[in-house]
Amino acid sequence: MVNRLKLSSFGHFRPKDLNFGKLKHCQTWIFHSFNRVLIIGSLLLLFLVAIGSGYFYNTNSFPQPIVLENAGDNRTNTNFSGECNLFVGNWVPDESYPLYNASECPFAEQGFSCLGNGRKDKEYLKWRWKPRNCEIPRFDVHVILKNLRGKRIVFVGDSLSRTQWESMICILMTGVEDKNSVYEVKGRKITRQIRHLQVRFSSFNFTVEFYRSIFLVQPGSPPKRSPKRIKKALMLDKLDDINKEWIDSDILIFNTGHWWTPTKLFELGWYFQIDGKMKLGMTINGAFNKALTTWQSWIENKINSDRTRVFFRTFEATHWSAGPREKCNVTRQPWSDTNGKDKSAFSDMIIDTVKNAAIPVTLLHVTPMGAYRSDAHVGNWSDNPSVPDCSHYCLPGVPDMWNELLFAFLFSEQQYQIH
């Protein structure tokens, strides 16, 4: 974060503090003149430094701030003084939500459209995230569309990344007059296994893309003569082989975490590999941390931070009930407390990795805010109601707020704490 230069810090610098001893009148006049020149020169130097600081702070691909809507709510009275941690706060009722109608958005996946799949209550749609000491600016979708002209936005991760991708497209489409001008470039349909989707907003000449990379690192076949229980090797020291396609982007958003579980790894025969050797005793947390180190090395060596703004979203809270058999009980209202769901070892490792990265990475620390939303999951209102879901969120819903946070970091004039 750029520190603001405060001229007031020089208020104690006074000419009489410069004591040059007892001098003749002419010498005194000369040194008084010198003092004045020194003061004027110092102020001029401060002015030039301030201009330079502003230049380096603002030389990015997205110089235009969001224009706040006159929405008739207190979000237009955003407090732009001091620092704001967007991730510490609570959910408040707001009748202006949801931001779009899923039935009118062809990119809102049927499996996440809870209303379309029979959910009757609508209270879960009427909440927005309120940071403790400030407000998230109310965005103007038309201004965002204008600022994204000519850009390439890329989401990389698992199905939770895909929901944020779908959410962004649906939000942005509300500002597009000709809906047919928004299309998937190759006419591909959204499926759970598809590796790449690219939606083009032709009227504004930008794309919003999704790459499925559930671990971020490269899966492959195990070495020969490996134990029979090993079906797949997760190469922790190699990033996913489609990584070259992520490089030339303007906004790059990563996530991972939901596949890093014993049931989705060990029970399916997935084990970890480093430098061509299987690491059968390696823990999932240790492997996750190693994968993040590989990701960090990749962004530091491959990403041009003068062009690309990198984000990493932390682990998204789930609400499976504890016990020998996990149950998914979707509530009617958000929890009043996080009940421990605001903590995640994966999120902690992501935060540490982002802090230590040699290039700027913006953290989207959504774990605490999602912890309250036991009401917002897909539950049994999916395209497969026999399989309950307390991991994914309904659309519209919580992923929309992730995008509001993203827009705030990209376009708002306010300075935010990222963790």
Image (cartoon, helix red, strand yellow):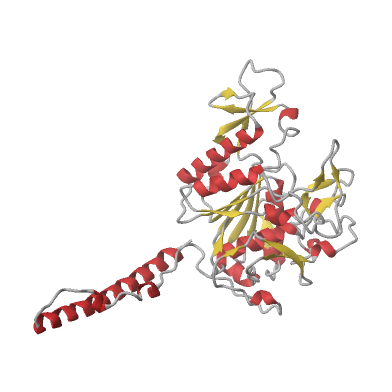
Q: Quadrant of residue 118?
A: bottom right
Nearest the viewer among 176 and 283 is 283
- At a point 53% along the width and 66% down the height, the residue shown is 415
Where is 33 relative to 50, above or below?
below
- At a point 53% along the width and 38% down the height, the residue shown is 294
In the shown orientation, is residue 358 left or right of residue 281? left
Where is 414 relative to 249, above or below?
below
Q: Quadrant of residue 88?
A: bottom right
Where does the image place residue 251, in percent across and percent down from the top left? 56, 56
Could you tell me if residue 8 is visible in this image? yes
Where is 243 relative to 274, above or below?
below
Nearest the viewer among 303 and 236 is 236
- At a point 16% along the width and 78% down the height, the residue shown is 31
Nearest the viewer among 103 and 94 is 94
Where does the image place residue 146, in percent across and percent down from the top left? 58, 69
The image quadrant where one finds the C terminus is bottom right
Where is 297 relative to 50, above or below?
above
Nearest the viewer among 3 and 158 is 3
In the shown orientation, is residue 354 left or right of residue 384? left
- At a point 35% along the width and 68% down the height, the residue shown is 49
**How many dots with numbers?**
0
Where does the image place residue 341, in percent across and percent down from the top left? 73, 49
Could you tell me if residue 110 is visible in this image? no
Q: Residue at the far top: name it.
A: 225
In the shown orientation, is residue 295 left or right of residue 263? left
Where does the image place residue 325, in percent across and percent down from the top left? 86, 37
